[in-house]
Amino acid sequence: MNVEFVNPFLSSLLNVLSTMAMVELKPGKPRVKKDEVARGDVSGLIGMVGPQTKGSFSISFDEGLALDIMARMLGERPDSINEEVTDMVGEITNMVTGGAKKLLGEKGYEFDMATPMVVSGKGHTIGHKTEGAIVLMPFEGEAGNAHIEICFDKDA
Amino acid sequence: MNVEFVNPFLSSLLNVLSTMAMVELKPGKPRVKKDEVARGDVSGLIGMVGPQTKGSFSISFDEGLALDIMARMLGERPDSINEEVTDMVGEITNMVTGGAKKLLGEKGYEFDMATPMVVSGKGHTIGHKTEGAIVLMPFEGEAGNAHIEICFDKDA
């Protein structure tokens, strides 16, 4: 996958989190995901469908980071991952993908988004089942880590 | 959501599993998912995008049922949910949604499918984040249970 496809998701995530929650994340090095498995405690997932390609995007948060984002947005930290937290993760998933869609649309890459889904469960893993490469990008935060995964079914 | 939208997924699932693995599932009563949370050990998820609506579909399996399906397909039962199992769950997700897409297309409801994602992790839960109703349908199998969840963002 072209780096042109990855950067819009990266910059959209940093923008969404700093705007919504004043949380700054430090992006790590993007890499092609092979056997390596990234785990999270709560993840947002969304499907993408375009005229030439289709794919999927996910963002996984450590519990500590997800609760910290909630605390900064609402002024109160929930005890655990509840429905308010999964709603917020769904909203972040939608906003990050929507931001990336806008940036990619400006470059002539069009896609539509499905509705987001949110998975919760300690240390779950996500596999994107496509023929194209899966790009994994880690992010480090003060309260925990996040990672995003992006794939399209053709190596664009 | 109209029952017209649910039945194609139901019949497609029964068809896929009996054809691929000679596994027969007994469908339970579909219901609108509210607070009630369905859990699974491995789940396939896929986004759907149509001209008038968008949505998401998921299918979750108990570990025992997922391993039984693998055993029936390959003649050998894996010890745990490995990448072969998640590949199979992704394939089932694709086939079930593809079958439903065909049936719904014949009725004039068109949508395109994104690529499937597979989540694994003991007892994870899935939330579909849309404004429309989420229909949850349980299935009982000899080796364990499955359930599917379907939602579209507008109550079609």
Image (cartoon, coloured by chain):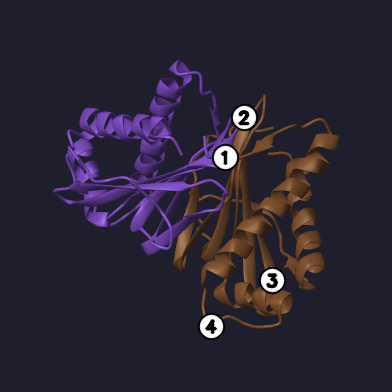
Chain colours: A purple, B brown
| Chain of the residue under label 1 | A
Q: Which residue is pictured at 53% across the width and 34% down the height? A: B131
Q: Secondary structure at mark 3?
A: strand
Near-viewer residue (A155 or A6): A155
Q: Quadrant of residue A102?
A: top left
Quote the CA–CA distance across marks 1 and 2.
9 Å
Label 2, on which residue?
A: A52
Quote the CA–CA distance across marks 2 and 3.
39 Å
Q: Which mark is residue B112?
A: none
In the rendered image, residues at marks 2 and 3 fall on the same chain: no
Q: Which residue is pictured at 22% across the width and 36% down the height? A: A73
Kindly indicate whether the residue at mark 2 contacts the one at mark 1 (C-beta within 8 angstroms): yes
Q: Nearer the viewer, mark 3 or mark 4?
A: 4
Q: Secondary structure at mark 2?
A: loop
Near-viewer residue (B80 or B61): B80
Give the crowd class for mark 3: few <14, some 14-19, many >=20 residues within 10 Å.
some
Quote the CA–CA distance across marks 4 and 1.
33 Å
Label 1, on which residue?
A: A154
Q: Secondary structure at mark 4?
A: loop
Place of residue B149 in the rendered image (x, y in percent of width and height, measured from the top left): 61, 52
In the rendered image, residues at marks 2 and 4 fall on the same chain: no
Q: Nearer the viewer, mark 4 or mark 1?
A: 1
In the rendered image, residues at marks 4 and 1 fall on the same chain: no
Give the crowd class for mark 1: few <14, some 14-19, many >=20 residues within 10 Å.
some
Q: Nearer the viewer, mark 3 or mark 1?
A: 1
| Chain of the residue under label 3 | B
Q: Quadrant of the C terminus of chain B?
A: top right
- Which amino acid type is shown beneath numbered disc 4? Asp
